[in-house]
Image: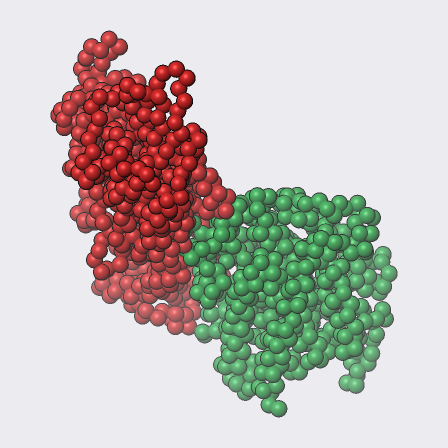
Amino acid sequence: MSPAVSAALEIALVIAVLAGLHVPLGDYMARIYTAKKDWRVEKGFYRVLRIDSAADQRWYTYLISLLSFSVISIALLWGLLAAQAHLPFDFGRSGMPKAQSFNTAVSFVTNTNWQSYSGESALGYTVQAIGLTVQNFLSGAVGMVVVAALIRGLIRRHTDRLGNFWVDLTRTTFRLMLPVSIVIALVMVAAGVIQNLSAPLDVTTLAGGTQTLPGGLVASQEVIKQFGTNGGGYFNANSGHPFENPSQVTNLLAIVLMLAIPFSLPRTFGRMVGSIKQGVAILITMATLWVGSLVTTMLVEEAHSGAALQAAGAAMEGKEVRFGIPISSLFEISTTLTSTGAVDSTHSSFTGLGGGTLLLNMLLGEIAPGGTGSGLYGMLILAMVAVFIAGLMVGRTPTYLGKRIGGEQMKYVASYILATPALVLLGTGIALLVPTAKASVLNTGPHSLTEIVYAFGSAANNNGSAFAGLNANTNFYNIALGVVMFLGRFVPMALVLALAGSLGRQSFRPDDSGTLPTHKLQFITILIGVVVLVAALTYLPALALGPIAEGSS
Amino acid sequence: MSAPVINKVEPQPKSSGEPHRIGAGVFRPASLIAALPNALKALDPRVMWHNPVMFVVEIGALLTTITVMTDFSGFSVWIAVWLWLTVIFANLADSVAEGRGRAQAASLRAGRDTAVARKLDSTGVETKVAAAELHKGDLVVCEANDTIPGDGEIIDGVASVDEAAITGESAPVVRESGGDRSSVTGGTRVLSDRIIIRITADPGKSFVDRMIALVEGSVRSKTPNEIALNILLASLTIVFLLVIMALQPMAKFSGSTQSIVVLISLLVCLIPTTIGALVSAIGVAGMDRLVQRNVLAMSGRAVEAAGDVSTLLLDKTGTITFGNRQASDLITAPGIDAGDLATAALKASMADETPEGRSLVELCEQRYGAKPPADARAEFIEFSARTRMSGVDLTVPTGTQRIRKGAASAVTAWVAESGGKVSGEVNAAVDEISSSGGTPLLVAEIFEPSGSAPRPTPGRVLGVVHLKDVVKPGIAERFAELRKMGIRTVMITGDTELTAKSIAAEAGVDDYLAEATPEDKLAYIRKEQTGGRIVAMTGDGTNDAPALAQADVGVAMNSGTTAAKEAGNMVDLDSSPTKLIDIVEIGKQLLITRGALTTFSLANDVAKYFAILPAMFVGVFPGLKALNIMKLSTPSSAVLSAVIFNALIIVALIPLSMRGVRYKPSSAAKLLSRNLWIYGIGGLIVPFIGIKLVDLVVSLIPGIG
């Protein structure tokens, strides 16, 4: 089988699995957020933690619960990282410096998983397992509960009660994240991912050099790293490391895992709002952007210019030969479009335009399909922008699913659209004005600008992948990116919950033939247009000076 | 039934083959020049501040001007000039919109200011005072050729009034004390007879005052959708400010620091100036279009709500059918002589001045030769919406004869009260008339003999009057159009269920409310609103007031009572019930115009990036030349061309924002496709062509090209 055919078959396989999976998984998730009964284990859990599972929280109580939970999580993780020298299985590793551990703690709690450290040398097994892995579960679940609350705002009437944060969080963890992770972790172990508590082993290689073979509880973290769209690698090489991602099989499994929840949530949405068609429209929008990005990346990576690349036959530097260009492209566009940020190749080594596409993927706002929960709520916000503009054009006060998009809603929607670009642009601007920050870049010319824009784009959108080439372990980047990650996660969430509250308070206006239909191809086209236009207008200057300048030279 | 009184026959819907379309207002280029002084006055930052988008442009123009002074170059002078022009063009749009109302306001004001009132004091002595000094409760007298000095209600007399000053309609209307035709408007003129009016508005609060304020745009507050749109525009402006703020460090890092002038030019081109400049003019022009159709909206909010309407409550009479139903036949009850029935019907209708009443009198006299009684003392019972009957109590030497005519159910109940029964034949006749679309009126009598221990005879039904109602031609097609727009039409009528059903079927309405009392209307509106629907209705009587107030859009007839006018949020000066449909379409057109120009404005940015970005950075990255797809001659001319295009497009779109975009009633999906093609795709392509054309001219300027 030629490489092209095998790659095509692999991509087709991923799509087929997702197509088959999204219906049952989406329906199952809808049941999680609508079920009346608690599981026995959950009841016990609520009793121990004194949670009133019947309480229905107003939007701000929901938000305060979410924020307190997240801030406490950051504090705990920060402490754990600082104290790791005193924990078992530390293998002599010292506590992480303050700025770096702040950055790491925020990073894992915000589902970003940006890493300014190298996993195999900086962290012991205990911190990896009870610090990072635990947050991989919880931060993904926090994203999910926010979208559940938003959907409730869309379907409820005359109330701004959006459910119970603690119940939603517990259910997401117990009913979805844990069972899937346990099963798939066993599959991963069987496929060759390591899972042990052995100390790192120094060996002498055939060539006479020494090499350290690391150990650790990798498989258990690897599953949730992908499934919760976290992306923080156990090892520095992330999914390029053979112990973390040993084969084509685990590579494809990783891709399916990171896309599974985000691509199934539109079904959950359709199920919960009582119109599968509405969910399908969102799914098609996401899928179209995903396919468009995949095709673009593969084309620019195969159609390489430059003598060295032509001689090599493809832009293979920084990519794993065992995966090849199409599958590396598939992995990287999926990781940048899902807020996962795990990598199996180096983004810096992509061609100018290929790297630019990966950057643009994140800058779209992590919505195609985006992170667990965050992808869907981001897309729904853009859908409301599309509804607003298109709705005016049909001569009606715009409504989405029977809810008016008026001044109050627009305030939250517009602030959401504003928040992330503000963080990316201001962050980049400030970094370029601070001499030490500017000195962190490895390359020169437009490529180095891309490195900085990429770092802030990745942090603000909670992706976590790095472009490489930027020394991010400086006080400036650890603190600046930490703050950007925190704001990039929780400001949009607060706006989404406030929006959900304001939508819930409204009554419901039934659709008629004078209402803009939001499930037809026409609306999907407008929505794609809005997504691309908003991102393009905001980031075109940055892209022009970085990747486009590099790619067109 | 209480037919709304129609002053003149409604013009029929256009019968030309062309589909119905909301027409455009007039726009004369000369009005741009006339509006210039006001546009310059509005450059005051304290005024500009209210429009954040254009305020940013003004600050940019100011900074550029300062740059010209400190660091002179021909290029910056050109940019500064065009940035100022951008702001002025935006103000021009506003002042053109407001200027259109001003002429109308001036003529209204002239009539009001010169009027002299003949005030009556408590003893009935007449004094002359200025109209502006009249207060609520004052009594004034008006005779032929007097101008009515203020809004009021006629408390005595009847007069024909020329309302042309308000409605532009030269045919005089009759106004009289009592009933639903008693209200008069200040500024109108009495043509004949003498009336005494009680003033109902304090100085400065009269109808004309409100009208002047409205057409001048001085009381315009932002509508909900406009507020939402402004929030979106403001946030886009902030995004682009951030883009420009981050661009300079990036440019410096790339070794190509940009001048302030170029950065400001890019900013102005990117922020949504086109829609930002026109958004308030669109709102003013929308109100103006209503005024041109003789509708006065009390708030912009009401106009917007009109576009959202999903249920229209329409009075059957005058809207769906011609108002004047004719009595066409009398059907006697078993054992009753046709002459007796005709005489009774005649007696009951002598005081009935409605067209139905008059037509019944005519029928009885001409076909049956009935004559009014000469010897009886008559006490007339007026029609009321509650009893749904009218009639007469005649005192004759032998006793009292009570005759009633009215809706079948009401008369049946009246007869039953006194122990009478309605025969099967009568009921059959009623049903037959109803199912044929006609209106049956039952005529019944009760005789109370005088003398000791009077025992009234049981009431008996004498017969049935057949009133014929004609559905207006073309109305069914109009309702079909409304249905496509997602609007349900509901026919309101005092007729019986059967009659209503038959007419409803003929006219093609979606629902009907038969034997409707004011309470029924109110309940129906509430029910619709609970279901999330937006309801519009027209009304004129005092008993319509609660329903008018409850409806999201309540259009009161100008001929109606003061109570009705105060309860509604619009007044139709022509008192035409069909106007409601026009109002809905104007509301929609207003929203569509805003949406279309927003889309156009945003789509424009793509071309502007393609003009300016390569111009800025082609020096350091020659590869970016590929982005210069318009092949603009030099970087300077590219930037200047984009700025000039950005300014000119505002002027070019002023007529469109005044007229409103073309609107043809159709489904949401169809409307959207059309507007997306024109304003979305058009918005992408037009600036590429426009900027290129401007560049061809600009490149001829020495030092730029």
Vertical arrangement, residue B290 with respect to residue A23, above or below:
above
Depth check: give the residue in front, B229 or B164. Answer: B164
Residue at the limit of the structure toward the top, as seen here: B123
Q: How is the image coloured?
A: by chain
Depth check: give the residue in front, B33 or B472. Answer: B472
Residue at 18%, 26% (x, y): give it: B159
Residue B194 in view: yes
Residue at 72%, 65% (x, y): give it: A224
Residue B23 in view: no
Vertical arrangement, residue B62 with respect to residue A549, above or below:
above
- What hue does chain B carry in this figure? red
In the rendered image, residue A31, in percent from the top left (x then y), is placed at 68, 59
In the rendered image, residue A249, in percent from the top left (x then y), is placed at 70, 79
Residue B610 horizontal side relative to residue A481, left or right: left
Residue B242 horizontal side relative to residue B54, left or right: right
Vertical arrangement, residue A8 with respect to residue B520, above or below:
below
- Number of dots carrying numbers: 0
Quarter holding the N terminus of chain A is bottom right
- What hue does chain A carry in this figure? green
Vertical arrangement, residue A505 with respect to residue A192, above or below:
above
Residue at 34%, 30% (x, y): give it: B445
